[in-house]
């Protein structure tokens, strides 16, 4: 054998040993990932079952045709106040003030499909479908109208859809820093914010079944949320269930269409309407992503948001518009008295 042939044989032998080592390493890594994945999935399943056991539904489950929705009601009197949360939120968003409302009238908070204790829907729901679900829920539970609808953020779009579909069932409306049907076309910051949110939700949806969201402590409960430790534990217990991130992702996708309308929101006639608007300007800290966002963009966002709020107040000939000082987007957390006062004044002084 020539020296060149011998050298080639040695090189080939080393290459083969190298490939064998690489295959073994990859097989070992794959095996480790499988073990870690099984362990994570087992941990998630056990923890999720414990959450469901430790935090049962505080209200009732009502069949609305194909899935059940969770409804919590308390108090007496009328009109019944119905609380509609923003995108990604559920009934516990209102835990800080709903007992206070129950002190002077009937109040109901509920979970949209896939949130809280409600069953998931088969697909993402448009605002009209959300409104239909809510109507079916209230009538199925025997909660008589007309209702005083209170909508926060995206919830404002949902309650306006409810009013459009069931005008005779609406006694009045309180919009809490409500979204607007044309905001996606008018707020330049929305595209980058929504893209960032959907990317994060896709990651969350993939990681949740393996318990990584729990381990990493990723959640959407603000540090300054004025809720009890019990409410926060129940909140996290529902948020860390496998389907939560997928539900939020689908809702955000559907809501993009709801808020990219070229036509203005439907006129509300003379429905009693109170529009509450954040008094604290949006800052960079309020945005989930600031890449490509300039101060001019932020200033424009605040200006347009105020325009949108004024337009909402103009939807009814019987409306008031209040800018709530020292409040961010969650006015019912930052300044709950302002929300309670608006509701109580609309309910009237004759209630117990």
Image (spheres, rainbow, N blue to C red):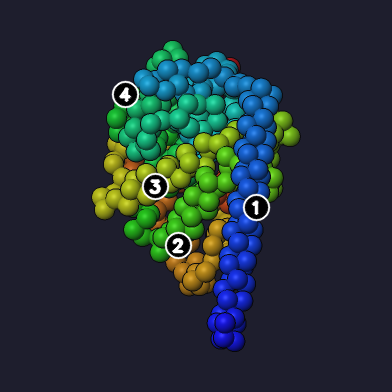
Estimate how packed mark 4 is, as few (under 14), some (14 to 19) or many (20 or more) residues with alpha carbons within 10 Å.
few
Dot 1 falls on a residue whose secondary structure is helix
Q: Label 4, on which residue?
A: 168
Viewed as shown, does residue 180 lie left or right of 231?
left
Which mark, residue 253? 3
Q: Residue 326 in the image: state x and y as whole percent.
A: 62, 53
Q: Residue 166 in the image: state x and y as whole percent.
A: 31, 26
Q: What's the distance in space between the residues labelled 2 and 3, CA to CA?
A: 14 Å
**Residue at the location (48% across, 41% down)?**
246
Q: Earlier in the sequence, mark 1 or mark 2?
A: 1
Task: Look at discs 1 and 3 and give the one toward the viewer.
Answer: 1
Q: Earlier in the sequence, mark 1 or mark 4?
A: 1
Q: What's the distance in space between the residues labelled 2 and 4, CA to CA?
A: 39 Å
Q: Marks 4 and 2: in contact by CB < 8 Å?
A: no
Dot 2 falls on a residue whose secondary structure is helix
Q: Marks 3 and 2: in contact by CB < 8 Å?
A: no
**Residue at the location (62% across, 68% down)?**
18
Q: Nearer the viewer, residue 290 or 135?
A: 290
Q: What's the distance in space between the residues labelled 1 and 2, CA to CA?
A: 40 Å
**Residue at the location (74% across, 34% down)?**
229
Q: What's the distance in space between the residues labelled 1 and 3, CA to CA?
A: 39 Å
**Residue at the location (26% across, 53% down)?**
262
Q: Earlier in the sequence, mark 4 or mark 3?
A: 4
Q: Earlier in the sequence, mark 1 or mark 3?
A: 1
Classify residue 171 by image quadrant: top left
Q: What's the distance in space between the residues labelled 4 and 3, CA to CA?
A: 30 Å
Which mark, residue 28? 1
Q: Label 2, on which residue?
A: 192
């Amino acid at each position: 054998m020539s020296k060149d042939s011998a050298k080639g044989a040695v090189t080939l032998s080393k290459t083969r040993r190298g490939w064998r080592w690489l295959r073994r390493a990859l097989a070992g890594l794959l095996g480790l990932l499988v073990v870690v994945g099984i362990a994570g999935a087992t941990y998630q399943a056990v923890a999720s079952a414990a959450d469901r056991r430790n935090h049962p539904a505080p209200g009732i489950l009502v069949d609305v045709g194909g899935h059940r929705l969770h409804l919590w009601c308390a108090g007496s009197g009328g009109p019944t106040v119905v609380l509609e949360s923003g995108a990604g939120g559920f009934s516990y968003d209102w835990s800080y003030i709903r007992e206070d409302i129950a002190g002077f009238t009937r109040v109901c908070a509920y979970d949209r499909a896939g949130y809280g204790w409600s069953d998931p829907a088969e697909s993402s729901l448009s605002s009209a479908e959300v409104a239909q679900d809510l109507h079916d829920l209230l009538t199925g539970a025997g909660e008589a109208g007309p209702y005083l609808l209170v909508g926060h953020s995206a919830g404002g779009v949902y309650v306006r859809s409810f009013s459009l579909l069931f005008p005779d069932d609406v006694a009045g409306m309180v919009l809490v820093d409500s979204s607007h049907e044309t905001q996606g076309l008018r707020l330049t910051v929305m595209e980058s914010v929504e893209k960032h949110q959907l990317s994060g939700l896709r990651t969350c949806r993939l990681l949740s079944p393996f318990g990584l969201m729990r381990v990493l402590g990723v959640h959407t409960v603000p540090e300054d949320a004025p809720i009890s430790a019990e409410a926060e534990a129940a909140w996290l217990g529902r948020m860390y269930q496998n389907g939560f991130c997928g539900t939020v992702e689908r809702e955000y996708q559907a809501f993009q269409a709801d808020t990219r309308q070229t036509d203005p929101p439907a006129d509300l006639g003379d429905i009693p309407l109170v529009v509450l608007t954040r008094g604290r300007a949006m800052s960079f800290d309020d945005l989930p992503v600031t890449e490509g966002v300039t101060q001019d963009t932020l200033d424009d966002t605040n200006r347009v948001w105020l325009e949108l709020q004024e337009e909402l107040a103009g939807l009814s000939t019987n409306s008031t518009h209040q800018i709530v000082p020292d409040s961010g987007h969650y006015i019912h957390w930052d300044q709950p008295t302002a929300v309670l006062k608006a509701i109580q004044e609309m309910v009237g002084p004759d209630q117990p």
